[in-house]
Image (spheres, rainbow, N blue to C red):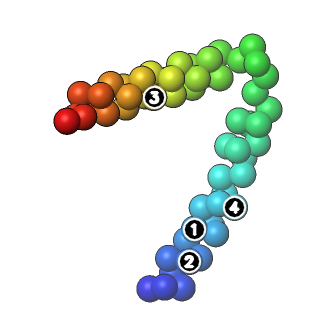
């Protein structure tokens, strides 16, 4: 099981290189990059609000 889990990570990393390369080729004007930045910013704000709400 250890070997299977260890090799699965390596296989996934090797097969996802195309996706990573497309991500690295995005320019600053890409629509996809704007979407990712917007979603990431929204998640950070949401996490901050949750922490403020849960503070004693």
Pointers 2 and 1 in contact (CB under 8 A)? Answer: yes
Around disc 3, counting alpha carbons within 10 Å, would you say few (fewer than 14), some (14 to 19), or many (20 or more)?
Answer: few
Q: Residue under circle 2?
A: 6
Q: Secondary structure at mark 1?
A: helix
Query: x%, y% of residue 54?
Result: 22, 34
Pointers 3 and 4 in contact (CB under 8 A)? Answer: no
What residue appears at the point 32 percent right and 25 percent down from the top-left corner? 49
Residue 14, numbered circle: 4
Is 54 situated left or right of 21 in this image? left
Is 25 situated left or right of 43 in this image? right
Foreground label between 1 and 3: 3
Q: Is residue 8 above or below residue 45?
A: below
Q: Secondary structure at mark 3?
A: helix
Residue 44, numbered circle: 3
Q: Residue under circle 1?
A: 9
Cα–Cα span, label 2 and label 1 = 6 Å
Quarter occupied by residue 21? top right
Cα–Cα span, label 4 and label 2 = 13 Å
Around disc 4, counting alpha carbons within 10 Å, would you say few (fewer than 14), some (14 to 19), or many (20 or more)?
Answer: few
What residue appears at the point 51 percent right and 28 percent down from the top-left corner? 40
Q: Earlier in the sequence, mark 2 or mark 3?
A: 2
Foreground label between 4 and 2: 2
Cα–Cα span, label 3 and label 4 = 30 Å
Q: Earlier in the sequence, mark 1 or mark 4?
A: 1
Query: x%, y% of residue 41?
Result: 51, 23
């Amino acid at each position: 099981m250890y070997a299977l889990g260890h090799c699965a990570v390596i296989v996934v990393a090797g097969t996802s290189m195309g996706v990573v390369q497309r991500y690295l080729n995005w320019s600053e004007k890409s629509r996809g990059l704007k979407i990712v930045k917007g979603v990431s910013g929204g998640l950070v704000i949401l996490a901050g609000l949750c922490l403020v709400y849960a503070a004693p």
